[in-house]
Image (cartoon, helix red, strand yellow):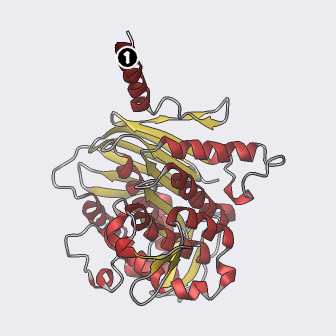
């Protein structure tokens, strides 16, 4: 497994964060604690490593300026910040100097970029030596991505970010996101998500016509959250269940929040694309549906052989579900409760509690579980208040 790390010094609310990433990464904490900042940063750095190089400047200095401008747009930086952010993937390092407003690439990355430029100019010939280039056809032409020497450490090409507030996207079924220009003052991650959602909707029927690309296990898990089956039609689609059909405009907030996630996950599963970053998958969902969506995210990650799942959450329920999947993996030769594609190796899980500008590791290495017991202080305090009130009532 690749070695991926992130170190943050004085970036908005995040004052001193040093984390190591695994295949499954969970960030929990109160609102406005910095969880979203972390996964947006991780998505940003992975995007650099898997960029459409034909669309980027050839010179390293111009490349640095290009990505810093995108960084500036994503994080809406309006005032000077004196801090640094350092990301490393294996031997490659990218450092953002917030004071000097510049991005610095390690020498190994500069070599990779230069090789890619040379090979592009040679009509996609593979370079000699250990540095390889992987090619994949897309609508925009050839996607080039530098990868590590070991095949098992390949960087996945597609980086999918699913933001919070997804409820507004279910009705965007036309071409709004395709005509939005980057000059418009809209966060690039929202534009990217809208484009991904529209593309996934466009391929919904073609995926349905190729049943080998999808499976009953995925659809059954999804139906536990949707409370039915999604049917796409010219009016935008509806949710079909045994009793009645529900148009999306009449669906519950939980159904509307989950629908874009379902459509994008369905496409990821069908085509096996890249890594997934998702904010608050539990939004507007009952605990049983939170269980289903957590299992769904793990299933798609495993079934597509992704090397990265990144989740932000407020819900201790999600940690409890992940603990069950970790334990199921530890007894995988004995258990029959969970599908093999739901199992989580503890060694590949990272869980952090984000608070007070830092990140605390929640893993209990002795028991091989995520520590979730001490997170729900509100329930504990509520129970104490209830006991005190009972004492007053019956004193």
Q: Between 45 and 272, which is closer to the camera in this rendering? A: 272
The local crowd at label 1, few if under 14, some if 14 to 19, many if 20 or more residues have their Cα within 10 Å, is: few
From this viewpoint, which residue is outermost toward the front? Answer: 394
Q: Between 131 and 255, which is closer to the camera in this rendering? A: 255
Query: Circle 1 sits in a helix, a strand or a loop, which is it?
Result: helix
Residue 349, above or below 118: above
Residue behind mark 1: 388
State the image coordinates of residue 46 (x, y, percent, origin top left): 46, 62
The quarter of the image holding the C terminus is top left
* Residue shown at 20% from the left, 75% from the top: 184
Residue 80, above or below 262: above
Q: Is residue 371 visible?
A: yes
Total numbered circles: 1
* Residue shown at 67% from the left, 56% from the top: 342
* Residue shown at 25% from the left, 80% from the top: 181
Which of the 4 image quarters holds residue 104?
bottom left
State the image coordinates of residue 327 (x, y, percent, origin top left): 70, 42
From this viewpoint, which residue is outermost toward the right? Answer: 333
Is 62 placed left or right of 261 in the picture? left
Q: Is residue 91 visible?
A: no
Q: Between 220 and 83, which is closer to the camera in this rendering? A: 220
From this viewpoint, which residue is outermost toward the top? Answer: 395
State the image coordinates of residue 389 (x, y, percent, origin top left): 35, 19
Q: Between 382 and 37, which is closer to the camera in this rendering? A: 382
State the image coordinates of residue 1 (x, y, percent, origin top left): 65, 53
Residue 394, above or below 331: above
From this viewpoint, which residue is outermost toward the left? Answer: 79
């Amino acid at each position: 497994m690749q070695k991926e790390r992130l170190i943050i010094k004085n970036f908005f609310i995040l004052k001193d964060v040093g984390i190591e990433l695994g295949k499954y990464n969970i960030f929990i904490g109160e609102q406005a604690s910095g969880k979203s900042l972390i996964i947006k940063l991780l998505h940003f750095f992975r995007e650099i490593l898997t960029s459409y190089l034909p669309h980027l400047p050839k010179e390293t200095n111009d490349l640095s300026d290009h990505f810093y401008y995108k960084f500036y747009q994503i994080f809406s930086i309006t005032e000077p910040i004196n801090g640094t952010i350092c990301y490393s993937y294996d031997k490659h390092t990218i450092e953002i100097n917030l004071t000097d407003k510049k991005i610095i690439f390690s020498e190994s990355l500069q070599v990779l970029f230069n090789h890619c430029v040379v090979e592009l100019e040679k009509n996609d010939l593979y370079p000699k030596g250990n540095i390889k280039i992987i090619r994949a056809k897309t609508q925009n032409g050839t996607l080039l991505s530098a990868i590590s020497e070991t095949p098992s450490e390949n960087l996945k090409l597609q980086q999918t970010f699913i933001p919070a507030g997804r409820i507004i996207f279910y009705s965007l079924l036309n071409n709004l996101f395709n005509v939005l220009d980057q000059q418009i003052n809209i966060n690039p991650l929202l534009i990217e998500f809208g484009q991904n959602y529209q593309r996934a909707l466009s391929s919904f029927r073609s995926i349905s016509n190729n049943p080998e690309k999808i499976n009953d296990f995925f659809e059954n898990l999804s139906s536990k959250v949707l409370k039915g089956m999604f049917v796409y039609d010219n009016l935008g689609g509806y949710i079909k269940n045994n009793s009645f059909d529900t148009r999306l405009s009449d669906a519950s907030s939980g159904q509307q929040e989950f629908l874009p996630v379902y459509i994008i996950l369905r496409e990821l599963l069908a085509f096996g694309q890249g890594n997934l970053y998702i904010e608050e998958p539990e939004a507007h969902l009952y605990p049983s549906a939170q269980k289903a969506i957590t299992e769904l995210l793990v299933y798609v990650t495993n079934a597509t052989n992704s090397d990265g799942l990144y989740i932000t959450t407020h819900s201790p329920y999600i940690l409890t579900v992940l603990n069950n999947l970790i334990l199921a993996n530890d007894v995988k030769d004995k258990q029959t409760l969970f599908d093999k594609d739901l199992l989580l190796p503890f060694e590949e899980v990272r869980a952090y509690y984000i608070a007070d500008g830092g990140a605390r590791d929640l893993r209990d290495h002795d028991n091989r579980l995520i520590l979730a017991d001490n997170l729900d202080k509100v329930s504990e305090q509520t129970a104490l208040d209830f006991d005190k009130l009972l004492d007053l009532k019956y004193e």
